[in-house]
């Protein structure tokens, strides 16, 4: 590693971005002082990033300790890092709600045998992991620390133990640094931007915890009643979660009807056109009847027209009913991919035609493919993406939108591409945040992509903006198992 005194702030910033993919706000207070920045970065690399302890365990421990920091940056960034490591929102909430360990409890509890273990199985021995985490909290607060050190030496190998102590020391430094610089904002951290919304959408109680964690997590004392503490915490979170769920459902409901309002003229045309055909056919039949003619083949043709166009109207109305209803609490069921796509297209194709927008559909590979899902929600996501594309290209010289549905390895892939030039790099990290929108006032709620992201991730999939494509493209991927999610 380059000597600290020979490195500039620009050199360090480039190295940090190269290693992490972004420059965390954690380092911003030292950005103009290379000797401080180099010191922080060196500790981060050696004690945290390159520490051989399992990544999931490191983030779990960092998140638990961050509960006691007065600045929320570390709590939010480490909690959000747990998600790409495989922890779901509910599991993260349960981890953060773990009561502060009692001295008496740890003094009377031990795990493992009398001697040092050769290798500690972090992945498959959760009881020991929980015990290690509890000991680490006591060591952090220097409460019965000598006893906790001795207990850890019994169950950890020498390397594991020393790596853990180094990591604990780094956490103390990091939390002290964060408290000394309360201006550090978690909102500017890429890990938070990419994961927080999905976590809160999946488990609204997490928002309650993050907003109230200093009140909910009691400091280390020897007199805390842990059953009472956890019961009170659960009650507070449950009450506030109900309020958040109502607000969240209302936001989703409003966003759907905003989208329907934007498409209203197109839907009206979609219904008016077949009604015109029906009325025309009835007029022909009435004329034939008045003239006393049997009509023959012409009469049969008009009846066929009435039947097919009536079915078309019924299909549109069913699509509206499907889209408008609240499907969030419905159980998942097997649905064909073709039907999911067709339900979305039934509400927007006429709008594209009326505005001279070319809509290309490529879905030849998925004729028999089925998903176990909430089909109304997936249709909503596709419709939302198509509507975003419509708004983006309606006034352009070249107006086209392409919907491509295919399979890729063990995944279903849905891509929506339009003739737009793409999204500015300044916005790509924000487009999935709630209420963020590039549309002018009165044109959209900013909830479409945020809600879509939550729906797709609830189906164990991903939705992402394809910045490498020359035009504007969003790609949805859903996992397949023998053709069924």
Image (cartoon, grey):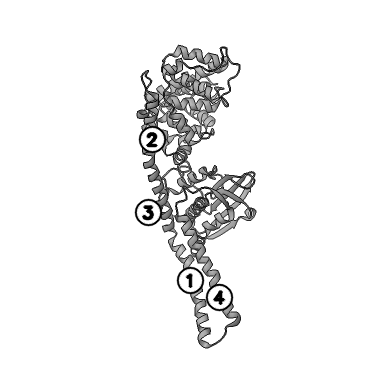
Dividing the picture into quadrants, the one containing residue 443 is bottom left
Front label number (2 vs 1): 2
Q: Earlier in the sequence, mark 1 or mark 4?
A: 1
Q: Earlier in the sequence, mark 2 or mark 1?
A: 2
Query: Which residue is located at x 51 percent, y 73 percent?
Result: 277
Alpha carbon distance from label 2 to label 1 = 53 Å
Q: Secondary structure at mark 4?
A: helix
Which x, y percent locates residue 437? 42, 48
Which x, y percent locates residue 387? 48, 55
Residue contact between numbered discs 2 and 3, judged by CB atoms under 8 Å:
no
Check residue 303 in the rendering and tell me which mark sits there, or answer none: 4
Query: Which residue is located at x 44 percent, y 42 percent?
Result: 433
Q: Is residue 144 above or below residue 258?
A: above
Residue at image mark 1: 275
Alpha carbon distance from label 3 to label 1 = 32 Å
Alpha carbon distance from label 4 to label 2 = 61 Å
Query: Which residue is located at x 60 percent, y 55 percent?
Result: 362
Q: Secondary structure at mark 1?
A: helix
Q: Is residue 315 above or below residue 461?
A: below
């Amino acid at each position: 590693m380059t000597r600290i005194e020979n490195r500039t702030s620009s050199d360090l910033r480039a190295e940090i971005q190269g290693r992490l993919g972004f420059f965390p706000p954690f380092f911003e207070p030292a950005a103009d002082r290379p000797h401080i920045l180099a010191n922080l970065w060196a500790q981060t690399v050696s004690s945290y990033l390159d520490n051989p302890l399992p990544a999931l365990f490191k983030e779990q421990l960092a998140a638990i300790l961050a509960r006691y920091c007065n600045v929320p940056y570390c709590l939010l960034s480490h909690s959000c890092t747990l998600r790409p490591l495989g922890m779901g929102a509910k599991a993260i909430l349960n981890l953060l709600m773990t009561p502060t360990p009692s001295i008496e409890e740890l003094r009377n509890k031990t795990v493992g045998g009398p001697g040092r273990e050769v290798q500690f199985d972090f992945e498959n021995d959760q009881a020991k992991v929980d015990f290690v985490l509890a000991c680490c909290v006591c060591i952090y607060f220097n409460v019965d620390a000598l006893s906790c050190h001795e207990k850890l030496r019994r169950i950890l190998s020498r390397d594991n133990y020393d790596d853990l102590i180094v990591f604990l020391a780094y956490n103390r430094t990091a939390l002290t640094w964060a408290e000394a610089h309360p201006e550090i904002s978690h909102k500017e951290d890429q890990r938070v931007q990419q994961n927080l919304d999905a976590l809160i959408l999946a488990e609204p109680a997490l928002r309650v915890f993050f907003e109230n964690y200093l009140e909910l997590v009691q400091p280390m004392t020897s007199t805390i009643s842990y059953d009472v503490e956890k019961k009170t915490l659960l009650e507070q979170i449950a009450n506030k979660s109900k309020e958040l769920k109502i607000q969240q459902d209302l936001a989703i409901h409003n966003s759907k009807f905003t989208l329907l309002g934007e498409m209203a003229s197109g839907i009206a045309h979609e219904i008016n056109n077949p009604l015109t055909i029906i009325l025309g056919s009835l007029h022909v039949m009435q004329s034939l009847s008045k003239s006393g003619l049997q009509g023959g083949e012409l009469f049969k043709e008009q009846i066929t027209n009435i039947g097919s166009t009536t079915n078309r109207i019924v299909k549109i109305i069913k699509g509206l009913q499907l889209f408008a209803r609240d499907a969030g609490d419905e159980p998942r069921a097997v649905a064909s991919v073709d039907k999911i796509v067709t339900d979305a297209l039934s509400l927007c194709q006429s709008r594209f035609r009326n505005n001279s927008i070319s809509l290309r559909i490529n879905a030849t590979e998925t004729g028999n493919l089925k998903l176990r899902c909430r089909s109304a929600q997936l249709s909503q996501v596709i419709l939302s993406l198509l509507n975003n594309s419509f708004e983006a290209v309606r006034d352009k010289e070249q107006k086209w939108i392409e919907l491509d549905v295919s399979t890729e390895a063990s995944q279903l892939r849905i891509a929506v591409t339009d003739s737009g030039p793409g999204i500015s790099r300044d916005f790509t990290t924000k487009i999935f945040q709630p209420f963020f929108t590039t549309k002018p006032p009165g044109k959209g709620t900013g909830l479409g992509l945020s809600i879509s992201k939550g729906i797709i991730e609830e189906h164990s999939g991903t939705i992402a903006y394809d910045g490498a494509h020359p035009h504007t493209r969003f790609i949805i991927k859903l996992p397949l198992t023998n053709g069924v999610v």
